[in-house]
Image (cartoon, grey):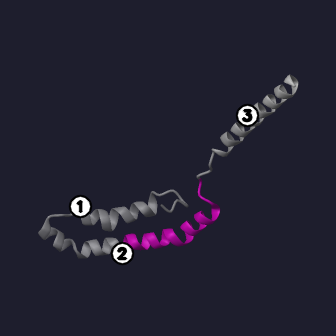
Amino acid sequence: MRRLFAYAVAAALSMGVATATAQADSAVIDEAPSAPAMVVDLVVIRPLSLAMTIVGTGLYVIQLPLDLIQMDFETPARKLVVEPAQYTFTRPLGQLE
């Protein structure tokens, strides 16, 4: 009876170790973007964001006289030019967030 109990305890401990090892291996998650996400980003998203950067720059130049009256150059420049340019040029390929 003691031998059977010892085997049961040994089996339970070995299953627990195997489960902990499997959980440790599955905890490593690949956060790299997938190939289709990179292709969509390169072919569709980047050209659209580049176009939005150009349009934003044009709108900023058009509304510049209003900025002279209000003396607020920073906010429109950031929203219309800087943020779209950063999204276009500094974001890693395939990372759409």
Left or right: 92, with 22 as reference point: left
Q: Amino acid at mark 3?
A: Val
Which residue type does callout 1 highlight?
Answer: Glu
* Residue 55 disc label: 2
What are the residue bounds of the magenta stretch? 32-55
Q: Quadrant of residue 22?
A: top right
Q: Which residue is mark 1?
A: 74
User: Which residue position holds label 3?
Assistant: 17
Q: Earlier in the sequence, mark 2 or mark 1?
A: 2
Q: Is residue 76 left or right of residue 34?
A: left
The quadrant of the image that shows the N terminus is top right
Name the main secondary structure of what is drawn in magenta.
helix
Residue at coordinates 77% horizontally, 36% vertically from top-left? 15
**Nearer-N-terminus badge (1/3):** 3
- Circle 2 crowding by C-alpha within 10 Å: few under 14, some 14–19, many from 20: some
What amino acid type should be assigned to the residue bearing mark 2? Val
Where is residue 14 shown, x and y percent of the image?
78, 32
The image quadrant that residue 41 belongs to is bottom right
Mark 1: few/some/many CA within 10 Å (<14, 14-19, 20+):
few
Secondary element at tag 2: helix
